[in-house]
């Protein structure tokens, strides 16, 4: 009787977890909290052409994505057949990427860049929103950060991470020249 009851409870829990609708193209229908869903939906509604590519990641443009934090990684992993949202390398910033977070200490939502070009952060809802970053690009590249039309900060690609609160750069960037 206990085994049957446990199986029924488990089946009901699994059905509840899988009931969240995820748009076509996403990797799975995983359990998500309402805050995560609101962040994803707001991004999809705000950025023209944005596409959900996983439970917590939205592709904003070629070479640009935003990743939102997930509260319950175990539940997400269980509902995605053992594949949890990807976290790798330097504070979740993959090799070859420039990543910027909305909060200090590489926390909160993260915008990720891979292509060498200048990006208008306002186009993605990230103008004046960056509080920390990791420049995990490779090779001899130099990233510039702009406040308006003025480059106010620069960093070589060294895998370096930086909090911007203590140096007057917090929430100041309007654009970034990646590479």
Image: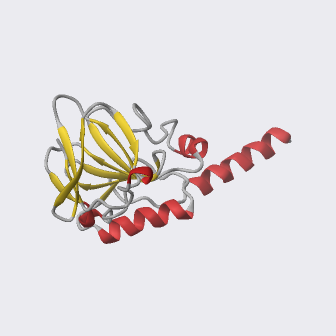
In the depicted view, which residue is nearer to us: 67 or 30?
67
Residue at the location (34% across, 64% down)?
Answer: 128
Where residue 175 sits in the image (x, y, percent)? Answer: 22, 58
Where residue 70 sits in the image (x, y, percent)? Answer: 52, 50
Where residue 56 sits in the image (x, y, percent)? Answer: 44, 52
In the depicted view, which residue is nearer to us: 155 or 17?
155
Looking at the rendered image, the quarter that the N terminus falls into is top right
Along the horizontal axis of the image, is 116 left or right of 28?
left
Where residue 68 sits in the image (x, y, percent)? Answer: 44, 53
Q: Which residue sits furthest left?
A: 117
* Numbered label tally: 0
Residue at the location (51% across, 51% down)?
Answer: 30
In the depicted view, which residue is nearer to us: 38 or 149?
149
As displayed, is residue 148 above or below residue 157? below
- Residue 143 position by quadrant: top left
Looking at the rendered image, the quarter that the C terminus falls into is top left
Residue at the location (30% across, 64% down)?
Answer: 127
Residue at the location (47% across, 67% down)?
Answer: 38
On the question of residue 136 being in view, the answer is yes
Q: Which residue sits furthest right?
A: 1
Q: Which residue sits furthest top?
A: 139
On the question of residue 55 being in view, the answer is no
In the depicted view, which residue is nearer to us: 140 or 122?
140
Along the horizontal axis of the image, is 109 left or right of 176?
right
As displayed, is residue 53 above or below residue 155? below
As displayed, is residue 155 above or below residue 34? above
């Amino acid at each position: 009787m206990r085994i049957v009851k446990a199986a029924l409870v488990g089946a009901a829990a699994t059905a509840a977890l899988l009931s969240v609708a995820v748009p076509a193209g996403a990797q799975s229908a995983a359990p998500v909290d309402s805050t995560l869903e609101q962040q994803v939906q707001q991004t999809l509604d705000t950025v023209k052409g944005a596409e959900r590519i996983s439970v917590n990641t939205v592709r904003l443009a070629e070479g640009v994505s935003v990743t939102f934090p997930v509260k319950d990684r175990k539940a997400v992993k269980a509902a995605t057949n053992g594949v949890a949202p990807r976290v790798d390398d330097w504070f979740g910033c993959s090799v070859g990427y420039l990543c910027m977070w909305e909060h200090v200490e590489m926390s909160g939502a993260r915008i990720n860049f891979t292509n060498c070009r200048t990006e208008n952060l306002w186009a993605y809802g990230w103008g004046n929103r960056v509080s920390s970053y990791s420049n995990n690009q490779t090779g001899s590249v130099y990233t510039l950060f702009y406040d308006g039309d003025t480059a106010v900060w620069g960093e070589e690609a060294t895998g370096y991470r930086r909090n911007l609160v203590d140096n007057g750069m917090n929430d100041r960037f309007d654009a970034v020249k990646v590479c």
